[in-house]
Amino acid sequence: MASVALLAIALGATSAVEVEQLKTEYLNSPLGLDTTSPRFSWAISSVGRGLVQQSYRIVVSKVGAGTVWDSHEVVTAVTHNIKYAGSPLKSGGSYSWSVRVTSSDGINSSAAATFSMGILAKADWSARFIGMASADEEQAVAPWFRKVFGVPPASLWEGQSALLHVSPVGSEPSYQSDLNLLCDCSGIPETEMFWF
């Protein structure tokens, strides 16, 4: 009887399955996606041998608005490039997604990640370019521009976030009012996004 109990404990210890490395479009929690059908991928790991994924279920939710896609259970061992097939994703929307995996020994495991959408249509764009129009050819080649703006105190940002999108052609760092460095734009390629 004791040997049966030890065998059960040993089997239980080796069958733990974890879902990890969740990616959206090959990225960890990406910001500003420009595809309306992002692809989801994950990996499974186990301390035991021979365990494989039997099925998955992906649920995508718009932050603050509820579920926009539920794949329901899909019987497959595929863990990569699962294409989004839900309601149209919105420009600037923030989304969370989770995947529940059932392994070959019947154990369920799940994990979650996030992603956000960029501007998907020209009509969704409401920003203005901050720059300097000049007839002076020298200034037109290397335009200098600056925009000062206020940021409310952190206490007013409870549960919220902001996105600073910088598209520099060589630029100076961006600073918060207390002079904490937010973004050193000097080594950025053409476009980059920053959360603060």
Image (cartoon, rainbow, N blue to C red):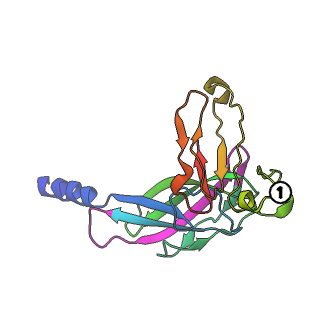
Q: Position of residue 66 (x, y in %)?
A: 71, 48
Q: Which quarter of the figure has residue 50?
A: bottom left
Question: Which residue is depicted at the point 63% across and 29% down?
Answer: 158
SS at circle 1:
helix
**The N terminus - image quarter:** bottom left
> Circle 1: is it few (<14), some (14-19), or many (20+) Cα within 10 Å?
few
Asked whether 62 falls inside the magenta stretch, the response is yes
Q: Position of residue 29 (x, y in %)?
A: 54, 55
Question: Which residue is depicted at the point 83% across and 57% down?
Answer: 124
* Front residue (pair 57, 136): 136
Q: Position of residue 96 (x, y in %)?
A: 61, 52
Q: Please tell me whether residue 159 is drawn above or below residue 2 in the rendered image.
A: above
Asked whether 13 falls inside the magenta stretch, the response is no
**Left of 162 or right of it: where is 29?**
left
**The C terminus - image quarter:** top right
* Front residue (pair 62, 28): 28
Question: Which residue is depicted at the point 68% across and 69% down?
Answer: 37
**Left of 169 or right of it: where is 52?**
left
Q: Amino acid at mark 1?
A: Asp
The residue that mark 1 highlights is 124
* Front residue (pair 62, 127): 127
Question: Which residue is depicted at the point 60% across and 33% down?
Answer: 176
**Magenta region:** 46-67
Q: Position of residue 90 (x, y in %)?
A: 76, 57
